[in-house]
Image (cartoon, grey):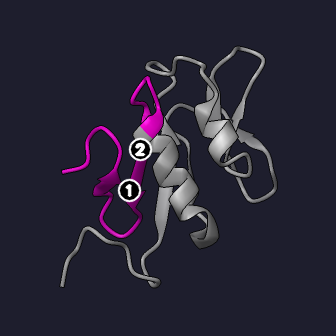
Amino acid sequence: MQQEAPTGAETLEVWIDQDLCTGDGICAQYAPEVFELDIDGLAYVKNAQDELLQDKGAATPVPLPLLTDVVDSAKECPGECIHVRRVSDSVEVYGPDAG
């Protein structure tokens, strides 16, 4: 059984490293329910109440129906600043540090 592919029972979360964000907004185009550009021109994740999480390293759960969009955002991000990790062990499964 592969550990890399998340199962339905696995909870994933996503966060953005604003120090690397280029402000292209590709993430917000792929998954506007999860990502949004703020007035500073950088992307941030949003919680389930649609509030921007601006604390450094703030993460939000990835809704399963949006997993593909969030993963595509991480893959296409020119700043390589989108990180998707398992909540259970904090292992990055998509993004620049995924093994």
Q: Is residue 21 above or below residue 61?
A: above
Between 89 and 25, which is closer to the camera in this rendering?
Answer: 25
Q: Is residue 32 left or right of residue 90?
A: right
Residue type pointed to by label 1: Arg
Q: Is residue 1 above or below residue 60?
A: below
Q: Is residue 68 left or right of residue 34?
A: left
State the image coordinates of residue 33 (x, y, percent, origin top left).
Answer: 73, 52
Residue 83: numbered disc: 2
Q: Is residue 77 magenta?
A: yes
Residue type pointed to by label 2: His
- Residue lying at 57% horizontally and 54% vertically, measured from the top left: 69
Which residues are drawn in magenta? 76-99
Disc 1 marks which residue?
85
Asked which quadrant contains residue 97, the reply is top left
Q: Secondary structure at mark 2?
A: strand
Q: Secondary structure at mark 1?
A: strand
State the image coordinates of residue 41 (x, y, percent, origin top left).
Answer: 68, 16
**How many numbered marks are there?**
2
Q: Is residue 23 magenta?
A: no
Q: Judge whether residue 45 can be spotted in this image.
A: no
